[in-house]
Amino acid sequence: MMNKRDLSFRQLFNLSFGFFGVQIAYALQSANISRIFATLGADPHQLSFFWILPPLMGMIVQPIVGILSDKTWMGKFFGRRKFYLLIGAVIAVAVMALLPNAGDFSFEQRVYLGLNTAMWFGLFSLMFLDTSINIAMQPFKMMVGDMVNEKQKGTAYAIQSALCNAGSLVGYLFPIFFTWIGIANTAPDGVIPASVKWSFYVGAAILILCALYTFFVVEEMNPQEYAEFHGLNKKEEASADDEDNVSTAHIVRAFATIGLVQFFCWAAFMYMWTYSNGAIATQCFGWDGVTTSAAAFQDAGNWVGVVFAIQSVGSLLWAMALPFIEHRFGNRGAYAISLLVGAVGFASIILVSNQYVLFVSYLLIGAAWAAMLALPFTLFTNAISGSKHMGTLLGFFNCTICIPQIVAAVLGGVLLTNICAGAQAGMLVVAGVLLVLGALSVILIKEK
């Protein structure tokens, strides 16, 4: 077996640098989709349904990318995972130029299944955007699993988490930055403001540059090196029907226990992404709850980017503290504590009427996000280390992220009406309750 050598910090950084650009695109999507579709005419009770597409596409695409890339070797230049990274980035750039213009095209405004033509165009653009982001995102997780030894995986995913949060910070702040430099933040009814459009354009440019950097700098292992690194013999490498090095029972147990925690966590954050705009507009900006072209709603949309950026700062700070918390309480203890801190942040939002006090709430939410980005993948990749189907398993593990978001999106309108009496801030309290359930579920995870 090949000696599982340590990689330098620079090599670990290069493996994940492109994730910075991908995360800018993801941040622009998560912070602005509710704003975009509300501007195009969506009712608040419809908003959660637009959020079904991103996780649905992720659940379909990421396992496919994992399965195909496990069987791919396109030579030293395109490698095993890098080919999919490049394809995803190129498609994402094209769609990011189209999506914010959904309200500008001269569509004949008809209504199909309750949605006008512009919303349908935006919906299909969102579908392709999230598909491409997922294609580009998955190779970064797989390359860490492919090329980093067990000792350094925590560090590698921590670097990826830091780049993820840095990219989120940039993407979240773009709309308010472009407004600050004088680009219009309001537009006629049904038209997306120019500040949002320019955010997507610049984000697309950064995405392709970062993806190209990782593509050209990183050299993946060839099939022989990969087999030696992961302890696969020639027979196992040649036959997909051979038994895996990791038992099915062990894999299922890891999926089930980590996946249950993931369910509560990602459902909670789905409600944050969906309802923060309406909640903040109503509580802190005096929005009437109806006119989405009003300055109060669009200003709140910019402020959502700011508080999401504050969440990223909180996540970065908490990520630096996590190793000390893990040393004192173990991985499971650190995971549970992080989720409980995030739950307090979510629940506190309903009490806030000052936009700056929201900084405290979203800083606390960042603690949960830091743990969600680092600990599940560390626990899971260590659990399946030695498997010859690393990419495939990671692709399917993404379903523990996607399924809860789909379930949350389907139930969002029902909960908003029957539990929260139409108050979007109430949905953030629901998110807090979900994180408490996630923290309680951590006890079921077996670390070894």
Image (cartoon, rainbow, N blue to C red):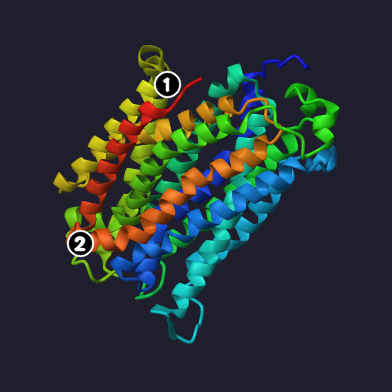
Write down the quadrant of residue 351 in the picture. Answer: top left
Residue 323: which quarter of the image? Answer: top left
* Quarter where residue 420 is shown: bottom left
Q: Give the amino acid type for the residue marked by disc 1 in the picture.
A: Asn
Helix, strand or loop at mark 2: helix
Q: Is residue 333 above or below residue 92?
A: above
User: Tag 1's secondary structure?
Assistant: helix
Residue pictured at 34% horizontal, 54% vertical: 302
Relative to residue 311, is residue 86 drawn left or right?
right
* Category of crowding for the residue at label 1, using alpha-carbon neighbours closer than 10 angstroms: few (below 14), some (14–19), many (at least 20): many
Badge 1 is on which residue? Answer: 331
Q: Is residue 270 above or below residue 10?
A: below
Left or right: 270 in relation to 282: right
Residue 342 coordinates in the image, percent (x, y): 30, 35
156 with respect to 348 (left or right):
right
Q: Could you tell me which quadrant the N terminus lies in?
A: top right
Tag on residue 418? 2
